[in-house]
Image (cartoon, helix red, strand yellow):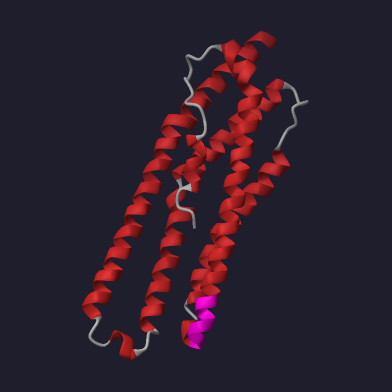
Amino acid sequence: MNWNDCEAIWKRQELPVGAGADLAALKSTFETKRRKLAATLLVRDCVEASAGMVVAVFFAFLWWKQGKAGWPLLLAIILVLWVTGVFIKERIRTHRQRLGAEAPLLARLEAEIGELQHQRRLLLSVWNWYLLPCVAAILIVLATTLLNAPAGVLAGHWLVLGGFFGAYLALVGGLVWLVWTLNRRAVRKQIEPRLEELETLHHDLLSSAS
């Protein structure tokens, strides 16, 4: 899996000002920013879903090489495909709910607020639906490969193997922490201020209509 794709999307977005943004500027740039967010979400979902399929095929190849003893790799494949399914589901949901540029501004604005609120929940819960399944799959693959390794390969090399696996797990742990931290930062620096901007604009439009 590409560990950074869930967060990297927000780095392409201009930092929002928040509730103090100029209303005229918010109106003039709204559609452009809405399209940009939709495009980057499309890239994220497609890249992650494709990566998940590639990883699942690789795990299946490892299972084939290890034979019947590699059956725990099926669990790793299921976990990876489950994560892949999340991104496919996101793409279907986004496609169904997408409003065209001809829709009223208020309707598009409310839809964008709802989308950002959804993305905020998604990023804040990234440990549950993304990181934990990926880490579990990696651990299953490592453990199964180690248990099924020929005895001659392991003999006399336990210290080296222990150091290798220890370093690898430390690397995975560092990446998990980094992704979790970056996603929370994206929520704090990008999504929440943008939500403040759009909610301010939403309030203004409702006040003008009443």
What residue lies at 60% left-to-right and 27% top-to-bottom? 33
Q: Left or right: 166 with respect to 69?
A: left
Image position, residue 182 (x, y; %):
40, 41
Q: Residue furthest right?
A: 102
Q: Residue furthest bottom?
A: 152
Is residue 191 visible in the rendered image? The answer is yes
Q: Give the range drawn in magenta.
A: 61-68
Image position, residue 99 (x, y; %):
73, 33
Q: Is residue 133 magenta?
A: no
- Locate the C terminus by quadrant: top right
Q: Left or right: 83 with respect to 102?
A: left
Q: In which quarter of the image is residue 37?
A: top right
Decide: is 63 above or below 6. below
Decide: is 199 above or below 115. above
Nearer to us in this view, 169 or 82: 169
Decide: is 62 above or below 185. below
Image position, residue 208 (x, y; %):
66, 9
